Image (tube, rainbow, N blue to C red):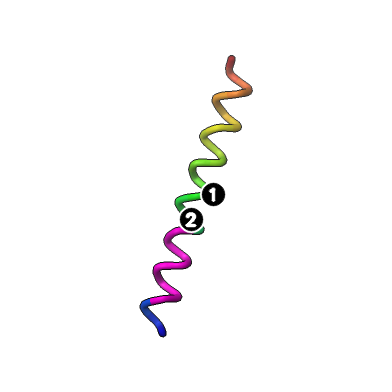
Amino acid sequence: MIQFCILFFFALCLHAIAFLLDMERCMTT
Protein backbone atom coordinates (compact mmCIF):
# COMPACT_ATOMS: atom_id res chain seq x y z
CA MET A 1 0.00 0.00 0.00
CA ILE A 2 2.86 2.39 0.83
CA GLN A 3 4.48 1.70 -2.54
CA PHE A 4 1.20 2.60 -4.25
CA CYS A 5 1.10 5.94 -2.39
CA ILE A 6 4.70 6.66 -3.42
CA LEU A 7 3.93 5.87 -7.07
CA PHE A 8 0.81 8.04 -6.96
CA PHE A 9 2.73 10.95 -5.41
CA PHE A 10 5.54 10.54 -7.98
CA ALA A 11 3.05 10.58 -10.88
CA LEU A 12 1.36 13.64 -9.39
CA CYS A 13 4.70 15.48 -9.18
CA LEU A 14 5.54 14.59 -12.78
CA HIS A 15 2.18 15.91 -13.99
CA ALA A 16 2.65 19.11 -11.99
CA ILE A 17 6.15 19.66 -13.45
CA ALA A 18 4.91 19.02 -16.99
CA PHE A 19 2.02 21.44 -16.41
CA LEU A 20 4.38 24.17 -15.14
CA LEU A 21 6.71 23.66 -18.11
CA ASP A 22 3.79 23.99 -20.53
CA MET A 23 2.65 27.20 -18.80
CA GLU A 24 6.17 28.63 -18.97
CA ARG A 25 6.45 27.74 -22.66
CA CYS A 26 3.12 29.44 -23.40
CA MET A 27 4.19 32.63 -21.63
CA THR A 28 7.60 32.90 -23.31
CA THR A 29 6.24 32.57 -26.85
Mark 2 highlights which residue? 13
Near mark 2 (Cα within 10 A), the count class, few <14, some 14-19 or many ≥20, is few
Query: Residue furthest toward the bottom?
Result: 1
Left or right: where does residue 5 sit relative to residue 23?
left
Percent across and percent down for residue 6 are 41, 72
Q: Amino acid at mark 1?
A: Ala
- 11 or 27: which is nearer to us? 11
Q: Quadrant of the N terminus?
A: bottom left
Percent across and percent down for residue 26 are 61, 23
Which stretch appears magenta? 4-11
Percent across and percent down for residue 7 are 40, 68
Give the secondary structure at mark 1: helix
Q: Which mark is residue 29?
A: none
Mark 1 highlights which residue? 16
Q: Image quarter for residue 10?
A: bottom left
Residue at 41% in and 76% down = 4
Residue 13, placed above or below residue 9: above
Left or right: where does residue 29 sit relative to residue 4?
right
Query: Residue furthest toward the left?
Result: 3
Main secondary structure of the magenta stretch: helix
Q: CA distance from mark 2 to mark 1?
A: 5 Å
10 part of magenta stretch: yes
14 part of magenta stretch: no
Near mark 1 (Cα within 10 A), the count class, few <14, some 14-19 or many ≥20, is few
Left or right: where does residue 2 sit relative to residue 18?
left
Q: Are marks 2 and 1 in contact (CB under 8 Å)?
A: yes
Residue 12, placed above or below residue 5: above
Query: Residue furthest toward the right?
Result: 27
Q: Amino acid at mark 2?
A: Cys
Q: Quadrant of the C terminus?
A: top right
Residue at 55% in and 32% down = 22
Residue 23, placed above or below residue 28: below
